[in-house]
Amino acid sequence: QVQVVESGGGLVQSGGSLRLSCTASVPIFRRYVMGWYRQAPGKQREFVATITSDGTTNYAGSVKGRFTISRDNAKTAVYLQMNSLKPDDTAVYYCNARNSALNHNLWGQGTQVTVSS
């Protein structure tokens, strides 16, 4: 069964750090574009960061310089290191695994990140 599962959310004070993890149960993980998205209360889900199979990264402007996405193909995992967190970063964070050739666009159940001021 193909799936992605996130972990690592929690409550942190403004200026603090958190590291999110996502494990993907998919065929040939290294061929997937992995990403993180978030959804704050009352808002639409938005892009945070992606990392391609060759390690190319892309970030939303609001997190660039503070967040770092990385992947470990051997562990079929992707991570999001979040530093200098702000209350505006409060949201449910979702992991995404995408493979166009297999028509896969998989989402995890989400993990809550709350940043207190």
Image (spheres, helix red, strand yellow):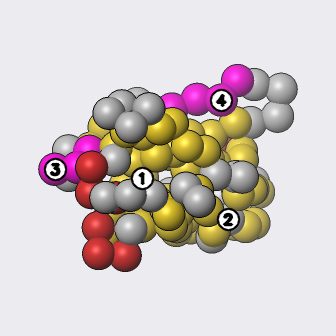
Snapshot quadrant of residue 7? bottom right
| Residue at the (29%, 67%) spot, across then down | 73
Pick whichever of labels 2 and 3 is earlier in the sequence.
2
Residue 46 figure quarter: top right
* Of marks 1 and 3, the one in the foreground: 3
Kind of residue indicated by mark 2: Gly
Residue 36 circle label: none
Mark seen at residue 54: 3
Element type at mark 3: loop
Question: Residue 44's quadrant in the figure?
Answer: top right
Query: Dot 4 corresponds to which residue?
Result: 45
Q: Earlier in the sequence, mark 1 or mark 3?
A: 3
Mark 2 and mark 3 residues within 8 Å of each other at the beta carbon: no
Judge depth for marks 1 and 4 and give the one in front.
4
Q: Identify the residue position indicated by label 2 in the image.
A: 9
Q: Earlier in the sequence, mark 3 or mark 4?
A: 4
Q: Position of residue 1 (x, y in %)?
A: 59, 59
Please, what is the three-letter code of the amino acid marked with disc 4? Answer: Arg
N-terminal label among 4 and 2: 2
- Counting residues from the start of the chain, the first of labels 1 and 4 encountered is 4
Residues shaded magenta: 44-54
- Residue ID for mark 1: 67
Q: What amino acid is at disc 3?
A: Asp
Where's residue 8, x and y in %? 63, 70
Decide whether residue 14 is among the magenta residues.
no
Q: Whole-Å distance between the Cαs marked 3 and 4?
A: 26 Å
**Residue for point 45% across, 58% down:** 26
Q: Quadrant of the C terminus?
A: bottom right
Residues at circles 1 and 3 in contact by the CB criterion of under 8 Å: no
Percent from the top left, x then y, of residue 16?
Answer: 58, 66
